[in-house]
Image (cartoon, rainbow, N blue to C red):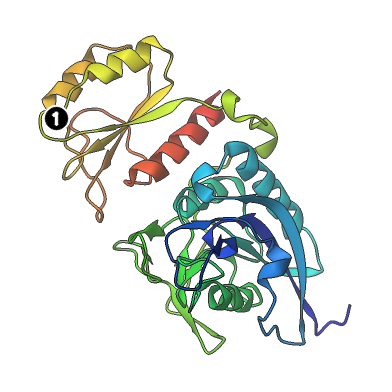
Amino acid sequence: MSEFVKKVVIIGTGGTIAGNAASEKELVNYSAGEKKAAELLRGIPVPENIEIETIELCQIDSKDMTFAILKKMAMILNDLMGRDDVVGVVITHGTDTLEETGVFLNCTVVPTKPIVLTASMRPSTALSADGPLNLSDSIMVATSDHVGLFALINNTIYLAEEVIKSHTLKVDGFYAGEYGAIGHVYNSKVEFFRNVKHDQKMNVILDKLPDEDKSYPWVEIIYSDVSANGQLISLLVDNGVDGFIINGTGNGTVHHNILNALKAIDKTVPTVITTRVPTGRIMNDQYGLMISPYSHAAKARMWLILWLLNSR
């Protein structure tokens, strides 16, 4: 390969970006994950100095993402980090669980080149589909000099572990809370607003992770709200739950019914406090509960599952 040619590997997992609908105006009722990664490249102008290699990992709706698939994804990424012929990687993903995949990869992959998660809010068949431009922009980020785990949606670059889905339909349906975006791609030009350094929240050894989902710890999210009922906690403990995420109010406050239920159970069941408030970090440790690096409940659940595995 010429030294002037840059190879980007695209890993396809399905999602809306690979979805098909019955008509161009249909934005809601469609089948996700029908197209392969190689098909998504059709019609996208790739510069002559960029070579594309595709890996078809799976074709799913990301609401059905599994730990088994995530482990395979991380193993592929770790292999690609060691390939001298690859300058960067793009992962096409569904929007529904992209935020959890960002946390999993942060804990299992140390990037030595750009890794970009991208997705779309409209299926590939839609009028003004957003997938092609998101994929094109992601390829540009993957060939840049910026090393890290990124997410790119609607011309905007985020750290993958920070991004959160914020709208059900709009093409600008992602944000990163108070962290904000770290860059953008306009007219195929990549610009970063600030320097980024990979901040791995946990060092998980992939070989120690189970191959089947049923072997992963069972962690449930409990919602704290008005007149919350704590009975579910004891029922889950009696049935072998491994951990809890308490999605609390405000600065990680918890209804007294849930607190009483937690006091009555085996203290060896790890319990992490999060908040249903969309922005801000939890600074409240008055209950003696664990606080993860993520105050978002789904992200914290992913973190606690990996923490439990690492602790074993």
> Residue 136 falls in which quadrant of the image?
bottom right
> Residue 190: percent from the left, percent from the top?
54, 83
Say whether residue 46 is left or right of residue 61. Answer: right
Q: Nearer the viewer, residue 64 or 24?
A: 24
Residue type at mark 1 is: His
User: Residue at the location (25% across, 43% down)?
Assistant: 275
Residue 215 can be seen in this image: yes
Above/below status of 187 relative to 74: below
Rendered residue at 47%/48% (across/down): 100
Residue sitting farthest toward the front: 22
Which residue in the rendered view is the most extreme toward the bottom? 187
Q: On the rendered structure, is 151 left or right of 36?
A: left
Residue situated furthest right in the rendering: 1
Q: Position of residue 249 (x, y in %)?
A: 17, 41
Residue at 63% of width from left, 32% of height from top? 209
Whether 92 is drawn above or below 187: the answer is: above
Give residue 177's position: percent from left, percent from top.
31, 61
* Left or right side of 140 for 262: left
Q: Is residue 50 left or right of residue 264?
A: right
Q: Quadrant of the N terminus?
A: bottom right
Residue under numbered circle 1:
255
Q: From the top left corner, tell me how far across and down residue 179 is, in percent.
A: 34, 64
Looking at the rendered image, the quarter that the C terminus falls into is: top right
Q: Residue at x 66, y 49 (%)?
A: 73
Say few, some or many: other residues with alpha carbon within 10 Å of mark 1 (under 14 / 14 to 19 / 20 or more).
Answer: some
Please tell me whether mark 1 sits on a helix, a strand or a loop. Answer: loop
